[in-house]
Amino acid sequence: MQALRGRIVQAESQAMAAPSVSVLITGANRGLGLEMVKQIVEAPRPLRTLFACCRDPDGPRAEALQTLAKKHPDIISVVRLDVDDLCSIKQCAQHVGSLVGTGGLNLLINNAGVLIRNTLQETSPEEMQKTFNTNVIGPMSILQEFLPHLRSAAKACGTPGMSTSKAAVVNISSTLASMQRIQQTYEFTPAVSYRISKAALNMLTMCAVEELRKDEILFSLLHPGWVRTEMGGEDGDIEAQESVLGMCDVMASLTEKQNGAFLDYKGNPIPW
Ligand code: NDP
């Protein structure tokens, strides 16, 4: 009991010493995104603003997020962002920029994603296009449009090195993108367009690592585990709460040594 109290006091004093950060999450209205909003807003780490983005903030699928936002009106800002729509990405980036100012955006989590269960022989060009739009082209456009805000955050931080408190992009990938693991996973979940799109997201991330290392922006790829969400289905191994607890710990521990790392929610490296 005393040890637990000690840990809480330590976490609280570390939290008071740390500067407050701004965080943006895409696909924040349900599944892993909504759980991230819940856990990040309740964590001791000081938060300036949590931009919880979804494509239809006033629709029925965003009710749980809106209820949560009402409990934390000074921190959570629900913003419209359709990852498939460049206009919406540009508008969101402008809006966020006007709120964060020179402090910038510290952590961008590209979480929104789609999965179509298809084999190679079934996959249509339309399915491939749709999956690419959301899982690859969306995160690419989001990175391009939010880059000035990430750069501002890196500059405003004023200390060397990399961290998710300074300036970082976490792209939610999947073990299904792993070429080395395909023999173990293919038969169970072919999902060809999804696998290819997440492998492309991984390469997009590595391109960003190379191009933006000088800006001291950290990039990382996280696999959340097989999680019981609408996408993961009822047979998943773990609940969203456990996955997000793990991913938040991993995100908090990232430094320049993990720039470009592909890790699972426990921090274990995933083979490419
Ligand atoms: P869900 O299907 O439960 O949720 C997907 C989220 O993405 C929803 O909020 C959805 O919003 C949003 N989304 C989809 N398309 C768009 C779009 N065009 N614009 C904005 N938002 C969009 O999935 P999970 O929560 O399980 O998955 C989250 C991430 O984790 C994904 O990237 C997924 O690939 C990854 N992942 C999940 C695993 C799992 O087992 N669950 C395993 C490995 C990776 P809307 O309600 O509007 O549709």
Image (cartoon, grey):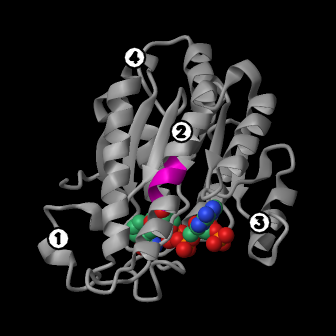
Q: Earlier in the sequence, mark 1 or mark 2?
A: 2
Q: Residue at x 55, y 11 (%)?
A: 158
Q: Does the residue labelled 3 lie within 8 Å of ligand 1?
A: yes
Give the labeled residue for mark 4.
Answer: 214
Asked which secondary structure carries label 2, the reply is helix
Q: In this view, does 66 lie to the left or right of 260?
A: right
Marks 3 and 4, the one that precedes in the sequence: 3
Q: How much space separates mark 4 and mark 1, taking CA atoms?
A: 34 Å
Q: Distance between the residues labelled 1 and 3?
A: 35 Å
Which amino acid does the dot numbered 3 rest on? Answer: Asp
Where residue 76 sits: x, y (%)?
78, 49
Q: What separation in Å lies between label 4 and label 2 (alpha carbons)?
A: 16 Å
Within 8 Å: ligand 1 and the Cβ of disc 1? no
Drawn side of residue 175 relative to residue 242, left or right: left
Mark 2 packing: few (<14 Cα in 10 Å), some, or many (20+)? many
Mark 4 or mark 1: which comes first in sequence? 1
Which of disc 3 and disc 1 is earlier in sequence?
A: 3
**Residue corresponding to mark 1:** 182
Mark before the other along the chain sequence, 2 or 3: 3
Q: Name the residue under label 3.
A: 56
